[in-house]
Amino acid sequence: MHTTCYIVLGLGFLLVQLQTTIVNAVTEGWRRHIVPDDYWQYDLENNPIQLRTKSVVGSGDNLEIFFENDEEEDAGDIYIYLDTPPTYELYGCTYESLKFPTELPDEVDKVWTFALSRDDGERRVVIHCNDREVLDMVISGVTCDLDDWRDYWDLDVTRVFIVGGDGFYRPGPCLAGDYMTESGCQQCGENTYSGDGAESCKSCPDGKTSAAGSTSSADCKEVNAEDEKRKYSGALFTFSTFSGIIMTFLLTLLIC
C-alpha cells in the first residue's frame, strides 16, 4: 500500500515538473519542434532561430541543425561539439571541426542563436551563445576547405531539422543592420541603422548619411560638401546635355 502511494506521489511530482517546464517554455515564446524527427518549414533566411542546451563545455554533447531548400536539397548543416575545446563544423564547407574563435559562456543553460544572411551575394553565418557572438563567418572559397561549397551554401534555406538540445525552439532576434517586421527581419534602409534585436531602425542625425544595413550611429557620416557639389554639377550637366539634345531635335524638325 505504501509502495503504491509513493509511486503515485512520484508520478504526480514528475507530472507537475513537466507541466511547469512546458508552461515556462510557452510563456517565454519557446515552442516544441513541429516535427521532432524530420525536416520542417522554417524561413531561416529572414528569421534567426534559437535553440537551447543544458550542457557544460567538455560534456561531449552535440547540437546539430540541418538545412534544406524547398526542393529538399541539402543547403548545408551546422554541428556544435561541446568537447574540450568546443568546436563547430559547417558541412559542405569545412573539412573538419574548428575551434570557436571566441570562448563560449560558462553557464550550463545556453541559448544558441543561428542567423543566415548574404553579404554581396555570399552566405554569412552568425552564431551567438547566450549574449556572446561566437562565430561570424562569410562562406566563400577563402574560408571553405571544400571546392563544392556553393552546391550547398548558395541555396536558400526554408526547411530545418534539429538534433540535440531540449526539443524547444523560438524565432531569434534580428541581427544588427536589420529590424523585425511581420514577415521577418528586413534590412534597414539608407541613412538609418539598428543594433541586434531591433524592432525598428533609427535615423541618422541631420546632415549625416549611412549605407543600407548600417549597424550603429558610428556608420552615419557627415555629408561631404564637395561630394554634394560634384553630384549637383553632374546632375546639372546631365540635364543640360539632355536639354540640348531635345532642342537640336526640335530645330531639326522645324528646319526640315
Image (cartoon, rainbow, N blue to C red):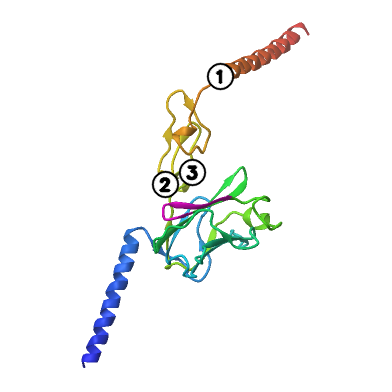
Residue at horizontal 40%, vertical 43%?
Answer: 199
Q: Are marks 2 and 3 in contact (CB under 8 Å)?
A: no
Label 1 CA crowd tier, 10 Å (few <14, some 14–19, many 20+): few
Q: Are marks 1 and 3 in contact (CB under 8 Å)?
A: no
Q: For residue 133: magenta?
A: yes
CA gap, disc 1 to disc 3? 29 Å
- Horizontal placement of 156 versus 102: left or right? right
Q: Secondary structure at mark 3?
A: strand
Q: Which residue carries the number 1 mark?
A: 228
Q: Position of residue 100 (x, y in %)?
A: 53, 57
* Residue for point 59% across, 54% down: 156
Q: Quadrant of residue 89?
A: bottom right
Total marks shown come to: 3
Kind of residue indicated by mark 1:
Glu
Residue type at numbered disc 3: Gln
Which image quadrant: the N terminus?
bottom left
10 Å neighbourhood of mark 3: few (<14), some, or many (≥20)?
some
Label 1 vs label 3, nearer the camera: 1
| Callout 1–callout 2 Cβ contact below 8 Å | no
Residue under label 3, please give it.
Answer: 186
First in sequence: mark 2 or mark 3? 3
Residue 148 placement, left or right of 86: right
User: In the image, which residues are magenta?
Assistant: 128-137
Q: Which residue is mark 2?
A: 197
